[in-house]
Amino acid sequence: MIIETIERLLNSDLSAYYIHQKTGVTASSIQRLRSGERQLNKLMLDSTEKLY
């Protein structure tokens, strides 16, 4: 459930900058997750909680 929620957020039309402003997760981390350069299952718990 948590992973699916975060995947919906990452696949949304919201900009990485907007998500950063609302969650505190860096825009570069969001961009790397979106591009596949970084895997969601390796995301730190702190970042996961912010995105959820």
Image (spheres, rainbow, N blue to C red):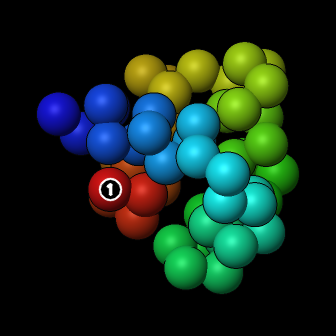
Q: Position of residue 50 (x, y in %)?
A: 40, 64
Q: With 3 as the anchor, is 36 left or right in this view?
A: right
Seen from the viewer's position, the closer of residues 13 and 28 is: 13
Residue under the image location 58 percent in, 21 percent down: 39
- The amino acid sitting under disc 1 is Tyr
Seen from the viewer's position, the closer of residues 23 and 47 is: 23
Q: With 4 as the anchor, is 26 left or right in this view?
A: right
Q: Residue furthest front?
A: 13
Residue 19 occupies quadrant: bottom right
- Give the answer, above or below, for where 14 lies relative to 43: below
Q: Residue furthest left?
A: 1
Secondary element under disc 1, as helix, strand or loop, is loop
Numbered-mark total: 1
Asked whether residue 19 is in view, the answer is yes
In the rendered image, the quadrant that contains the N terminus is: top left
Disc 1: which residue:
52
Asked whether residue 26 is in view, the answer is no
Q: Position of residue 3 (x, y in %)?
A: 32, 32
Residue under the image location 39 percent in, 49 percent down: 48
Q: Position of residue 21 (x, y in %)?
A: 65, 81
Residue 8 occupies quadrant: top left
Q: Position of residue 4 (x, y in %)?
A: 31, 31
- Give the answer, above or below, for where 25 lies relative to 2: below
In the rendered image, the quadrant that contains the C terminus is: bottom left
- Give the answer, above or below, for where 32 lies relative to 45: above
Mark 1 crowdedness (10 Å alpha carbons): few <14, some 14-19, many ≥20: some
